[in-house]
Image (cartoon, rainbow, N blue to C red):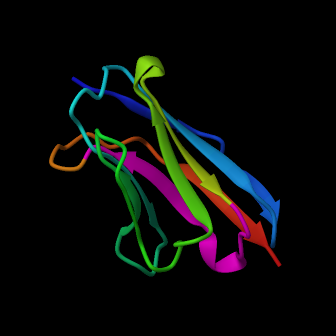
Amino acid sequence: QVQLVESGGGLVEAGGSLKLTCTASHSPTNQSVGWYRQTPEQHRELLAVIMSGGRTRYGDSVKGRFTISRDDAKKTFYLQMDRLNPGDTAIYYCHWPGTTHWGQGTQVTVSS
C-alpha cells in the first residue's frame, strides 16, 4: 500500500511563499503526481500535475504562481507556492492520479 505524507503547510502573510513536500513510501516510476486543495465550500481542486517525463499542467487559479516538481530518487514531490493570497487558504493534498493514493493533507492559511 502506497503512503503519501505532505508537509510544509502553515500560516503565511499575503504575498508570501511556502513550499509543500510530499514524500511517498514507494517510488513513483511511470506515475504522474498531482497537488490538490479543498476548502469546506468547494470541491477538491486540481492545482498541478507533473507527468513521469516531467511535463506539467496547472489549474488556472495557480498558473504562474505555483510550480510543481519531483525527485523520483528521493520519492519526493514539491509544490512551490508564490504570491499567496487569502483565497489560497485550504487543505492541500498530494495524489497519484488514477489511483486511490492520497496524503492526509496539510493546512495552508494565508492572512491578509
Q: Residue furthest left?
A: 98
Quarter of the image with the N terminus in it: top left
For residue 107, what is the image quadrant?
bottom right
Q: What's the residue at 23%, 50% (across, down)?
A: 97
Up-down relation of residue 61 to residue 90 (above or below) = below
Query: Could you tell me which residue is drawn at 34 percent across and 51 percent down?
Result: 55
State the image coordinates of residue 26 (x, y, percent, origin top left): 31, 20
State whether residue 38 is above or below residue 3.
below
Q: Which residue is found at the position 61% from the left and 72% from the top? A: 88
Rendered image quadrant of residue 57: bottom left
What quarter of the picture does the C terminus occupy? bottom right
**Relative to 22, does residue 79 appear above or below in the rendering?**
below
Asked if residue 9 can be seen in this view, the reply is no
In-image side of 12 versus 50 (left or right): right
In magenta, the rendered stretch is: 82-96
Is-magenta flag for residue 80?
no
Query: Could you say where residue 60 lies in the image, as x and y percent from the top left?
Result: 45, 79
**Residue at the (63%, 69%) spot, across then down:** 89
Q: Nearer the viewer, residue 101 or 81?
A: 81
